[in-house]
Structures are given as C-alpha cells and as structure tokens.
Image (cartoon, grey):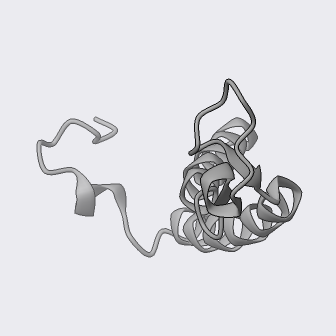
C-alpha cells in the first residue's frame, strides 16, 4: 500500500465515522426550547463538534490500522475478493 492509498483510506474512514457520530447526543433548538426567529426548530443548539471530531479521529485510526495491517500483511489476498477476475496482475 502506497502512502497516498493509506491517506485516502484514512480519510474515507474518518468522514464515514464523522457522519455517523454527528447526530449522536445532538440537542436541537426545539429540544432546548429556545428557537431563534428565522431558523428551523431542528437547527442544532449544542453540537460538540470538537469533541466528536477527536472521537472520530481515534476510532478512524484504530479501524485504519486494522485494515491497513490486513492489507499489508496479505492475510486476505486480492484473489479472495476478486469475483470477476479483473484484479489479477496478469
């Protein structure tokens, strides 16, 4: 795995996990009861994005390390997931 592939794999993990983590424990203006005129009641009031970004970074790193380890070690070869026979080096 090249360095660019490793960075792209990490970025994919990071963004996927971040999109999963964002709505967890989100408090909207409707939940708090203080709706600002001109905004939707579902607009976030307390979002804790910095904390969620740090949690995402840690979880993404763990998943990336496991996945990169599997790819680099060759435990699961490309032939095991190539059902159409298009990824062979021939």
Q: Is residue 77 left or right of residue 5?
A: left
* Direction left: furthest residue: 84
The residue that appears at 69% across and 48% down in the rendered structure is 44
Q: Is residue 63 above or below residue 42?
A: below
Image coordinates for residue 69, horizontal then vertical, percent? 61, 71
Q: Is residue 13 left or right of residue 82?
A: right
The residue that appears at 54% across and 59% down in the rendered structure is 20
| Between 73 and 10, the one nearer to me in the picture | 10
Q: Is residue 6 left or right of residue 81?
A: right
The answer to which image quadrant residue 79 occupies is bottom left
Image coordinates for residue 83, horizontal then vertical, percent? 13, 51
Quadrant of the drawing holding the C terminus: top left
Image coordinates for residue 64, horizontal then vertical, percent? 64, 64
| Between 54 and 36, the one nearer to me in the picture | 36
Q: Is residue 87 above or below residue 31?
A: above
Image coordinates for residue 23, horizontal then vertical, percent? 58, 58
Q: Is residue 43 left or right of residue 48?
A: left
The answer to which image quadrant residue 51 occupies is bottom right
The residue that appears at 48% across and 68% down in the rendered structure is 74
* Direction top: furthest residue: 38
| Between 88 and 52, the one nearer to me in the picture | 52
The residue that appears at 88% across and 56% down in the rendered structure is 50
């Amino acid at each position: 795995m090249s360095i660019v592939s490793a960075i792209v794999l990490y970025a994919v993990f990071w963004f996927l996990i971040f999109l999963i983590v964002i709505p967890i424990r989100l408090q909207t203006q409707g939940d708090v009861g203080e709706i600002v005129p001109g905004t939707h009641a579902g607009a976030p009031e307390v979002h804790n994005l910095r904390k969620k970004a740090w949690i995402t970074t840690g979880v993404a790193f763990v998943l990336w390390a496991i996945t990169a380890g599997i790819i680099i070690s060759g435990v699961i070869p490309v032939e095991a997931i190539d059902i159409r026979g298009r990824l062979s080096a021939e």
